[in-house]
Image: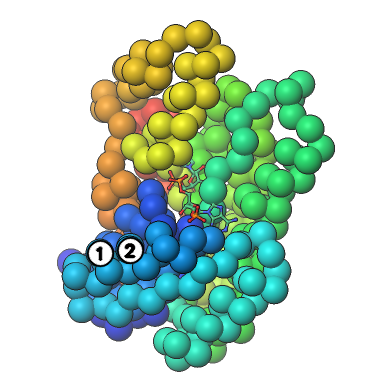
C-alpha cells in the first residue's frame, strides 16, 4: 500500500525518545519531513542525526516546553517557516505523575492538566491556521486509560479522557476543512515510561521491578510488551494519505490488554 507520505510535513511532539521518536522514525522512512520537538536540545540533535539516515525525509528539531504558551507559538511558527506548511500534527507529551486520589496535591493536578490536556489544546490552536486551507491529519496520543481506568494513575484516567472527548468534537468541527482527527491509546509499549512506572509500582508493593514487569506482561493476551516500532506503524497509517475516511475514532494499540468491546 502506498501511504502517500512522500514530502508531507509533520510536527511530532515529544519525539526525543519513546513513542514520539518511533513515530517520527516511521514517518521519515516513508519520506515525510519531520520536526522533532522536546525540551532537550542535546537529545533532539542526537535523534535528528539518527533519523536522518533512515529515509529521504528532512529531519529538523526545535527545543520547546509544551506547557509554556510562547514556546509553543514560536515552535509552530518556526516549523511553518521551515517547511512552508504543516500537514501532520502528532500531539504527545510526558506522562502524568502516578498516584491515587489521596496522595495527589493541587499542584500535581494542575501540572497534569497543563501537560496532558491544555498543551494539546494550545498545539492544535496554533497549527490550525496552517492546516485549514490544505487539510491534514491530527493524532492525539493518550493511553488505554480512556477505555479502562488504570489503578494508581488517576491523573491519566482523568485528563486523557478530556483529550479523547476533545478529539471526537474536533473531528466533527474540523471535517469541513478536510482535517482528520483521531485518538491513539497505547498500552504497555516498552519505553522509559513503562520502566519508570514498573519501578514506582515495585516500590509501592515492596517487590522487584523485574517481578512487576513479569506480572504486567502476563496480563497481556499477546504475552509481552509491544515495541515502539509496532506502535508507530498503526499511528502512521492513521496519519497517512492512505487514510482518507477514518476520523473521530480511537485506535487502541495494546496487545489485547483492554477488556472493553
Ligand atoms: N509507553 C506506553 O506503553 C504508554 C502507555 C500509555 C500512555 N503512554 C503515554 O504516551 C506518552 C509517550 O510515552 P513514552 O512511553 O514515549 O514516554 P517517555 O519515554 O517518558 O517520553 C516522553 C517524551 O515527552 C517529552 N516531554 C515531556 N515533557 C515535555 C514537555 N513539557 N515539553 C516537551 N516535551 C516533553 C520527553 O522529552 P524531553 O524530556 O526531552 O523533554 C520525551 O520525549 C506519555 O505521555 C505516556 O504517559 C505511554
Q: Residue furthest front?
A: 42
Q: Position of residue 67 (x, y in %)?
A: 67, 59
Is the residue 21 above or below the residue 122 in the image? Answer: above
Residue 239 shown left or right of residue 247 in the figure:
left
Residue at horizontal 44 percent and vertical 78 percent from the top: 87
- For the residue pair 240 and 126, the one nearer the viewer reads as 126
Quadrant housing residue 167: bottom right
Quadrant housing residue 11: bottom left
* Residue 16 appears in view: yes
Mark on residue 50?
1
Q: Residues within 10 Å of mark 1 (few under 14, many from 20)?
A: few
The residue where tag 2 is placed is: 46
Quadrant housing residue 192: top left
Residue at horizontal 64 percent and vertical 77 percent from the top: 73
Do the numbered discs 2 and 1 sit on residues whose CB atoms are within 8 Å? yes
Q: Is mark 2 within 8 Å of ligand 1?
A: no
Of the 4 image quadrants, the one containing the N terminus is bottom left
Closer to viewer: mark 2 or mark 1: 2
Query: Considering the numbered disc 2 on the image, is that residue within a helix, a strand or a loop?
Result: helix
Residue 103 shown left or right of residue 239 in the figure:
right
Amino acid at each position: 500500500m502506498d501511504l502517500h507520505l512522500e514530502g508531507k510535513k509533520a510536527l511530532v511532539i515529544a519525539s526525543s525518545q519513546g513513542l514520539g521518536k518511533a513515530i517520527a522514525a516511521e514517518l521519515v522512512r516513508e519520506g515525510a519531513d519531520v520536526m522533532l520537538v522536546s525540551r532537550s536540545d542535546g537529545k533532539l540533535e542526537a535523534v535528528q542525526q539518527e533519523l536522518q539516515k533512515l529515509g529521504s525525509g528532512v529531519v529538523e528539531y526545535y527545543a520547546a516546553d509544551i506547557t509554556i504558551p510562547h514556546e509553543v507559538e514560536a515552535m509552530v511558527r518556526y516549523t511553518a517557516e521551515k517547511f512552508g506548511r504543516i500537514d501532520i500534527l502528532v500531539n504527545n507529551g510526558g506522562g502524568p505523575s502516578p498516584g491515587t486520589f489521596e496522595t495527589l496535591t493541587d499542584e500535581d493536578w494542575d501540572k497534569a492538566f497543563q501537560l496532558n490536556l491544555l498543551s494539546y489544546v494550545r498545539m492544535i490552536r496554533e497549527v490550525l491556521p496552517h492546516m485549514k486551507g490544505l487539510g491534514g491529519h491530527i493524532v492525539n496520543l493518550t493511553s488505554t486509560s480512556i477505555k479502562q481506568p488504570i489503578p494508581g494513575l488517576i491523573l491519566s484516567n482523568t485528563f486523557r479522557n478530556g483529550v479523547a472527548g476533545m478529539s471526537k468534537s474536533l473531528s466533527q468541527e474540523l471535517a469541513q476543512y478536510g482535517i482528520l482527527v483521531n485518538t491513539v491509546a497505547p498500552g504497555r509499549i516498552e519505553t522509559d515510561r513503562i520502566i519508570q512506572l514498573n519501578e514506582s509500582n515495585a516500590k509501592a508493593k515492596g517487590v522487584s521491578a523485574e517481578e512487576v514487569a513479569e506480572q504486567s506482561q502476563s496480563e497481556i493476551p499477546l504475552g509481552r510488551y509491544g515495541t515502539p516500532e509496532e506502535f508507530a506503524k498503526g499511528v502512521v497509517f492513521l496519519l497517512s494519505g492512505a487514510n482518507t475516511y477514518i476520523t473521530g475514532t480511537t485506535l487502541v494499540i495494546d496487545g489485547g490488554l483492554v477488556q472493553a468491546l
